[in-house]
Image (tube, rainbow, N blue to C red):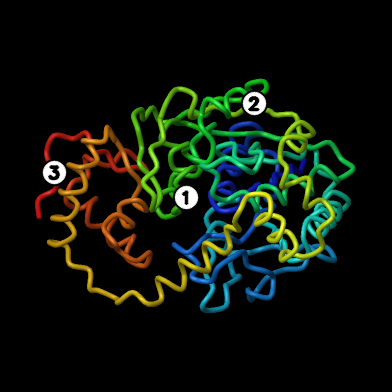
Amino acid sequence: MTRLIVAAGGGGDAVAAAMLHAALYGDEDQAVILTYAWDRLLVDPVPGPRRPSDFTGLELLTQSVWLVPAEARPIAPAGSTLPRLAAELPHTFALIDPQHGAEGITRQLEELVRHLEPTSIDLLDVGGDILARGDEPTLKSPLADALTLAACCQVNAPIRLLVAGPGLDGELPIAQVQGLLGPLVHTFTAKDVEPVSPILEWHPSEATGMLAATARGVRGVCEVRDAGLSIPLTDDGPSVHEVDLDDALSRNELARAILSTTTLDEAEAHSREICGYSEIDYERNKAAWLKDQPAEEFDPRTVLSQLDHFENEARGRGITHTTFRRLAEALNLPGTQREALRALLLETAPEWYAAPLWDLTATEAPSP
């Protein structure tokens, strides 16, 4: 049997989709994960999602759907985690190309459904920002989710909307997300995380990282992103809930507005109008800013000294955990030095590692 899982926002949602497939369906079923190549600036210095022409080595599955095998490579300067995911996971990864708007994604889904005849179709979102109206002040990245939601609602096939890790993306207040959830489908456990554990060692997704950490029993308050958002790690963290697909569309004003869009630019314009911004504009502005920043050498002693200061301040804010991405942002390190930072910290104080998070509650700091 073949299962189709649509990773609503790309990035970490694709990793969560692999975890979901193993937990719900086991090893006997095959899974095709349809996802964006949209890894943000930490991995991909080029703003916005990648299209098929940004890769070499893709395999054409249907008229408008390309598979991303392990041999595929993004064309520089673009970057993507998808080829490595394809190399390290048993799932088949197919590329969402949003360049033709919601209508284009709808067409890709319809072709996949005809070609695969899947036993089930799940639309998976980690955090729950797919349930946003569009005017929430904490909402930061609504466009990708709105596009997949709009497309899934137009496909003539039963599609189940699942929200994993309610509130873990920091986009909507947890209380608001919880009030919109339907039946509990699954609660992830440490055993469920095992199939993707090697992925979490290098993949930068914060929301899926926290989802896995809560499944392993980590509790507290995690600080994430460049803005330093505080995310509660609670017993609700590892849960997966079903949400009525039509109800989500009725709530999501941006998704409704872009139902008939035929270009990504058109969808972006609706985002600016409804949400007041486009997340791709944010990436464009940040990419331009990063380009002008001087490249500094990674100095372990300086980094550990700065880390000690950050950790003391974070504890004062009630923070118990953080992500390596947040640490890199807080210490003004470029994304290219994130792995160097992670390796340094795991070498100097491995007991602080609450996989895949950094634990600030240990009693002794790493020594400069």
Say what secondary structure mark 3 lies in.
loop
Local crowd at mark 2 within 10 Å, few (<14), some, or many (≥20)?
A: some
Marks 3 and 1 sit apart, C-alpha to C-alpha, by 25 Å
Could you say which is closer to the camera, residue 290 or residue 127? 290
| Quarter of image, res 132 | top right
Could you say which is closer to the camera, residue 177 or residue 300? 177
Give residue 99's position: percent from left, percent from top. 73, 66
| Quarter of image, res 96 | bottom right
Kindly check if marks 2 and 1 are in contact, taking CB atoms under 8 A apart as contact.
no
Q: Which mark is residue 89?
A: none
Q: Quadrant of the C terminus?
A: bottom left
Mark sitting earlier along the chain (3/1): 1
Q: Which residue is mark 3?
A: 365
**Residue kind at label 1, given as amino acid type:** Ser
Q: Residue at x 57, y 34 (%)?
A: 164
Against 306, residue 31 (above or below) is above
The reply, left or right, for residue 101 in relation to residue 81 is right
Against 69, residue 174 (above or below) is above
Give residue 54's position: percent from left, percent from top. 63, 74
Local crowd at mark 3 within 10 Å, few (<14), some, or many (≥20)?
A: some
Kindly check if marks 3 and 2 are in contact, taking CB atoms under 8 A apart as contact.
no
**Residue kind at label 3, given as amino acid type:** Ala
Against 356, residue 281 (above or below) is below
Mark sitting earlier along the chain (2/1): 2
Local crowd at mark 1 within 10 Å, few (<14), some, or many (≥20)?
A: many
Q: Which residue is mark 1?
A: 205
Say what secondary structure mark 1 lies in.
loop
**Residue kind at label 2, given as amino acid type:** Leu
Q: Quadrant of the N terminus?
A: top right
Q: Which residue is mark 2?
A: 180
| Quarter of image, res 16 | top right
